[in-house]
Amino acid sequence: MSYTNILSQFSNGITVITINRPSKLNALNKDTIQELHDALDEANNDNDTKVIVITGSGEKAFVAGADISEFADFNIEEGGKLAAQGQALLFDFVENLSTPVIAAVNGFALGGGLELAMACHFRVASTNAKMGLPEVSLGVIPGYGGTQRLPQLVGKGRAMEMVMTAGMIDANQALSYGLVNHVVSQEELLPLCEKIAGKIMRNSSVAISEAIRAINANYEDGINGFDVEIESFGNCFGTEDFKEGTTAFLEKRKADFPGA
Ligand code: COA
């Protein structure tokens, strides 16, 4: 598939999706959200892709937010629809992909940008990254899951302060909050993501997808995560990967997983 606002490149088991509107600091307009959905869907359905990395083009921004120019004149109904469609198409969609998704936060991750990073399975940042949810400074609130995922990741008090002040935190503060897992220089950002992806790829992709499902269940209303874990655990016993993983251990050799 060819895209206008993003790039999607596959090599060595990793699909790197780059949001490519540097002149607008990679702001998420409607078309970019649709293209991200399509590229993520394609990568998730590609058996050769074991890990997906999302990043921004240029040296300044991951994503500087939803494209403000697209919604500045919206009414109540249009505002609600914008949030609902975006959440379904991109933010909830990323979170529930069965392929691991890493956000490589290479600069500003503001508003919808931080919300996209938070919807990924985990985050790695470069030292120049700045993160925040500035929506209340525009007279609106985060609408792509930010009010839910930020407190899950950093705790309620820190999330309240970040949202109320509309301020930005730097990469080291994000690290101390647990919002990102690692901080490295900009040059080291993609290599580190590839290194982590390499570790992930050694393991059973089928088991990893069951683990994503079970961990996500902890954050879903009305769902008992322990029950989901039991079901997912049981599912693993019916897979070729489980046979290979346990047999390889008993035969004292490295597992060679057939995968999905
Ligand atoms: N939506 C639409 N356009 C955006 C944007 C957004 N969220 N963020 C940046 N841009 C555009 C700017 O309008 C500008 O376009 P122009 O050159 O055509 O005027 C271009 O990207 C560069 O941004 P600029 O503001 O000139 O860069 P800067 O270095 O001075 O400031 C930021 C960087 C990130 C601090 C600033 O762009 C900003 O505050 N952006 C909005 C952040 C935000 O509120 N996001 C939440 C949206 S809900």
Image: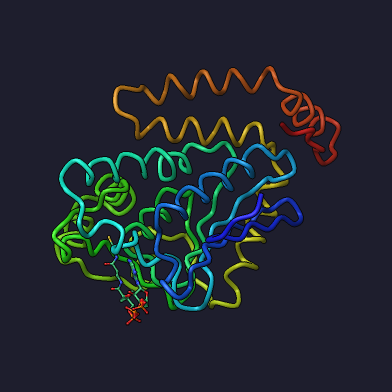
| Residue at left offset 35%, top offset 40% | 85
Q: Position of residue 46 (x, y in %)?
A: 70, 40
Residue closest to the eye, 103 or 21: 21
Horizontal and vertical percent for residue 27? 40, 64
* Residue 11 pos. (x, y %): 75, 57
Is 143 in front, or is 209? 143
| Left-right relation of 27 to 240 | left
User: Which residue lies at the image location 35% right of the left edge and 35% below the top edge?
Assistant: 219
Indicate how the structure is coloured in the image: rainbow
Ligand 1 is located in which of the four quadrants?
bottom left
Q: How many callouts does the rendering have?
A: 0
Residue 202 position (above or below residue 220) = below
Residue sitting nearer the eye, 153 or 100: 100
The quadrant in which residue 50 appears is top right
Residue sitting nearer the eye, 131 or 23: 23
Rendered location of residue 95, percent (x, y): 46, 41
For image coordinates 56% across by 44% down, the residue present is: 38
Q: Quick check: 183 left or right of 53?
A: left
State the quadrant of the C terminus: top right
Q: Is residue 175 above or below residue 257?
A: below
